[in-house]
Amino acid sequence: MTSVIPSTQGPTSEHDLFSDYTLSNTEEVYAELRSLGTVVYLAKNDVYAITRYEAIRSANADPSIFSSKQVAFNQQMNEVLAGTSLAADPPEHSKLRSILTDNLSPRAMRSMKSTIYADADTLVKQLVERKHFDGMADLSVAFPVSVVLDLIGVQGEKRAKILPWGEAAFNLLGPMNQRAQDSFPLAGELFKWTHEEMKGEDLAEGSIGRAVWQAAERGEIAPESFGYLVHQILAAGMDTTIATIGNMIQLLADHPEQYAKLRENPSLISSALAETLRFRTPAPAFGRVTTQDIDVDGTVIPKGSQVALLYGSGNRDETKYENADAFDVTRNPVDHLSFGYGIHGCAGQGLAKLEIFGLMEAWLKYVERFTVEDVVPRLNNVSRPINSMTVRVL
């Protein structure tokens, strides 16, 4: 399935990053690409995939060469994302980003901690009393959706629509394959609401959404940035957290010896979360575009090329992590790539950690042993969601 293309372009592969096979076997495909080289050209996607940890981190650290103007793998979505911090480079990025970080600062998160932890404790206790439940719908989805929608200030009937809207938006970050085309109607509803219908007064007082609207009212950001930023938060603020909660529960069930270590030493929750994010990256590939010819470990990526930063591959890079294919809650890989790196590091990671820490603290409190069965994945171009799984508390 591989060959070498001429001159300085390096290895190539016939794998399609967004095929059903790759989405179902991401770690195996990424391992093959990683074995070929730091940069692999994928003809079916017309993409240069960067596979190794250090090269991915370096690319994220240099937006002047690896621009976020093409964070999606299709031009239509890149045009839609223009005006969001996700798809902006300096200096435009700084102003847009500051609106998010001001409202997701460690200080803001500290004020929310007691409420989030109390809600997590209540939910987990109720589920454990049932003895078996859907680990996705009842836990991994229910909790972050409630937290994030309250944070954004979404009220009324729109709350039920946000999750499918967000997953559709992730599909549209990939190429215009059938999955993306099928997601257009739902993603279009999200875009229409955030850009044409939503008003600041629709969002709860004191919420991040209301704060973004107020920033636009004060002239700190362009009026149209209100819709773009709320769109960005709603589309991306839940899916990866949902996937990570599900992954963590499944991995701990699949590795009972690791769960025993965690119960014995709950201070390992942070380390276990970092290892979950490293071991099973919730959004394993993101796009960039090169602004000039750039040599990466002997392979020249031409100016104007679409690049895929394979976070999921870098997180399994054997030259970075010893015994990289083992799940070890004591590893504490705080430098994993799942939150990105540099100016585009995930703005919502503090909230995600707070939610997951709260859930896991309650889980360790109420659950001595458990199993996970009937895990049903769902294919998405960019995220790696689990559709459903049965959790049984023993």
Image: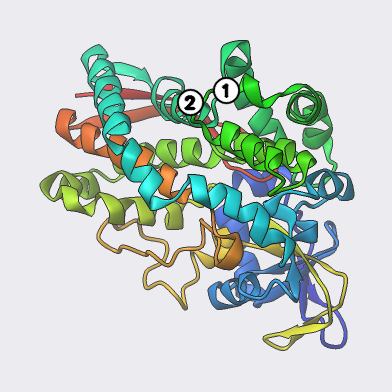
Image quarter in which the C terminus is found: top left
Look at the image and tell me whether residue 366 can be seen: yes
Q: What amino acid type should be assigned to the residue bearing mark 2? A: Asp
Determine the residue positioned at 26% across, 49% down: 269
Tell me, for residue 37, which label it has, or none: none
The residue labelled by disc 2 is 150
Does dot 2 land on a helix, a strand or a loop? helix
Q: Is residue 200 left or right of residue 254?
A: right
**Whole-percent x and y of residue 305?**
85, 69
**Residue drawn at point x = 74 percent, y = 45 percent:** 173
Number of numbered discs overlaid on the protein picture: 2
Mark 1 touching mark 2, by CB under 8 A? yes
- Position of residue 381 relative to residue 373, above or below, is below
What is the secondary structure assignment of the residue under circle 1? loop
Q: In which quarter of the image is the N terminus?
A: bottom right
Residue at the image position 35 percent from the left and 17 percent from the top: 133
Q: Nearer the viewer, residue 131 or 121?
A: 121
Q: Image quarter for residue 346?
A: bottom right
Say which of 352 and 366 sits in front.
Answer: 352
Q: Where is residue 197 in the image (x, y as percent from the top left)?
A: 77, 21
Count neighbours of disc 2 (C-alpha within 10 A) and say few if under 14, some if 14 to 19, many if 20 or more.
some
Residue 235 appears anywhere in the view: no
Q: Determine which residue is flagged by label 1.
A: 154
The residue nearer to you, when weighing 161 against 168, is 161
The three-letter amino acid code for the residue at tag 1 is Val
Side of 290 relative to 52 (left or right): right
